[in-house]
Image (cartoon, rainbow, N blue to C red):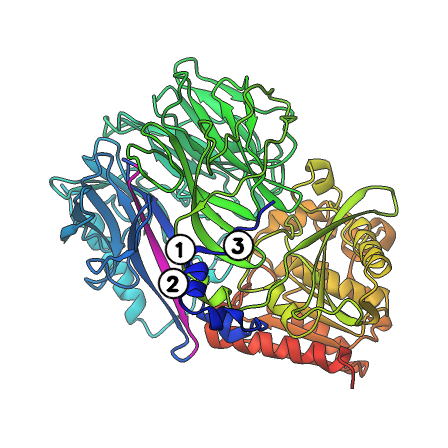
Amino acid sequence: MSHCKPFLLAAILCLLASAACAQTKRPMTFEDMMAMKRLGETAVSPDGQWLAYSVATESIETNKSTSQWFLQKISGGEPIQLTSLKPGDSGLQFSADGKQILFESARSGSTQIWLASFDPATGAIVNEHKLTSISTEADNARWSPDGKSIVFTSAVYPDCPAITTTDNSGDTCNADRDKAAADSKVKAQIFTALLYRHWDHFTGPRRSHLFQVSIDSGSARDLTPNDPHDIPPFSLGGDGGFSISPDSKELAFTENPDEVPATSTSAQIYTLDLTNPTAKPIKISTSAGGNFSPAYSPDGKYLAWRSQARAAYESDKFRLVVYDRAAKTIKNLLPNFDNWIDEFVWESTWTDGTQHILFVSGEKGKSVLYQIDSKGETLRRYGQIEGEWSGIHYAIWHGSNIPLQLTPGYDIVIGSLMKADQPSEVFAADFAKANDGAARILIQKAGDASGKATPMPKYQPYQITHLNDALLAQLDQSELESFWFPSKDGTKVQGFLIRPPNFDPNKKYPVKFLIHGGPQGAWGDSWSYRWNAELFAANGYVVVMINPRGSTGYGQAFIDGINGDWGGKPYQDLMTGLDYAEQHYPFIDKSRECALGASYGGYMANWILGHTNRFKCIVSHDGMYNPESAFGTTEELWFNTWEFKGAPWDYYGKPDVENPFRKWSPSLSAKNFKTPTLVIHSQHDYRLDVSEGYQLFTALQLQHVPSKFLYFPDESHFVQKPQNSQLWYKTVNDWVDQWTKEK
């Protein structure tokens, strides 16, 4: 597959300054990575003419990230900075008629919804004004299709009176409670239930509720008054968790109704009649597992969402189901499709008049685009596109004379695309009609719903944004290489490799062996700012990555292979994969290898520490050291309960071999620790408490194993502040250099 190179801007620079382009490319540095502009939110105008997107810029000096919005013609042209939106403004969306935008801004002192007029002909944005003034602030704003109202979320005190425009007591109650908490000298909290903290914050007494605000009057009302649950529940994906029907008369949303959310993943889909102020939510989903991302079809006949079958298993297969609103029936559109539905969007039209869904599914280190009709009868698979494709939009292009030579009426898919050697950029692709030019037909005209659609030709979509072309053109980065090997039980497992800059096949290179987290995650052809494989390779290393049992993109049975077997088959896959790489890549120096992992990768680093001495060093970031203690300090108890098949007390009195909490505990192999280890943990990591890092470091120090602890008092499960990230990369790379570089 082509790799979207050379980039347009780079080519232009070469024409203007050929001498500069002739210079030898250089390895990437941390400063280069931090100088890269980061694509944020995107929005497409309903006529398919305009792309709005935010760009974040990191500053090492100020230790902050700032963002700014831009507007650009999808047909090409220079981006226009939206000066009417201030740095930090977010959530820009176009109204259905394309004549207004909404956005969220804290320019008035608190985050509220703002509106502005938009001229589709010129792209001008004027008359911005504040719509809401709710004391609890506004988030996740979304237009109703009729343009008469906006639905948003706000965290309120459920025991306060419901916030309405006819009675101000609810808003006053919330404001008074917030002020009392801020003014109090006592910061103690009393917990009466679990999930009192989550990821990086204490949850407190407020809960997210859904609100509707009128465009004309600015009047707002709580659509889920006095509900004790978060609506929608927390989601790392951040898809909003709700949808408004095309006629603007109904709302669909996600809620987890269980009394103990710390042990449950059973989020359900509810609908609410927006025309009746006294209406109550109606549950329409039926699966015991999680149900997420509800979305109405353009004709309003269907409601689709991502659904899991098994309760309390956050990594069960995400299926695509469709609810027939008239018949009140639910259908799994792809019963034989074995990979996850990661993201989907309804197409607004199709040449045969039927409704279709575009969806993205991870597959063997790639993200693949598919299309399925609302009846589940015809599955079309687009040609594989290099990298990770996400943030998809669907638009109808009404213009002409654009670079892809598309004619009016062509269907356009717009999304972000990243690769291991390129951060996210926005791309557009024609997936509907044949064209002898750059836009080749990618749709399989006949397929089936078994997931066995024939791959179509490889395809390079048209790049719209060019945020980092000039900088990337200067850097020597290797493309991601894939290899396959049989594990000890014969299962085929995939691995990846990145060569260092200025690669010489006759030299021997040390290895950074990266282990992904999740554990239901995967390495692939994607960019990361926190664990950047290209940056790890940049100072003279071969980077090797394996997707062991538990990894996504290889079918649900492969994912389930890690359940209750954390140190078993996954460990075998990792070691066998590294053996294979050593045998088939002669430039690897197997005497100079370091293993690095975070989250589950940190757990595996700890497990490796007690079960092999093949590595010169280890880096363990936010890893589980003692599953029994981790069970009592984590917040998402459903995860540990599923992965270790119960609670620790369920195994009291049984031998360790029958107790997964002890059978797979790195702490019980502490007497075998010999490898120099860098431990990294953060105070606000409530997913894996900092005490796990303390215990590991104590065991290493008391046994005189060379070790170091990098502690962040102001970070969570992820290290995000620029200066902290700089220290993280320096400390990690220095540690690996200390033990693997030739003296």
Q: Position of residue 204 (x, y in %)?
A: 41, 58
Residue occupied by mark 1: 40
> What is the C-alpha distance between the residues marked 1 and 3?
22 Å
Magenta residues span: 48-60
Q: Which mark is residue 5?
A: 3
> What is the C-alpha distance between the residues marked 1 and 2?
7 Å
Q: Are marks 1 and 2 in contact (CB under 8 Å)?
A: yes
Q: Main secondary structure of the magenta part?
A: strand
Give residue 108's quadrant in the image: bottom left
Residue occupied by mark 2: 56
- Closer to the camera in the image, 393 or 145: 393
Is residue 655 visible in the rendered image? The answer is no
Reading the chain from its start, which is encountered first: label 2 or label 3?
3
Q: Position of residue 196 (x, y in %)?
A: 49, 56
- Closer to the camera in the image, 714 or 743: 743
Does 303 appear in magenta? no
* Circle nearer the viewer, 2 or 3: 3
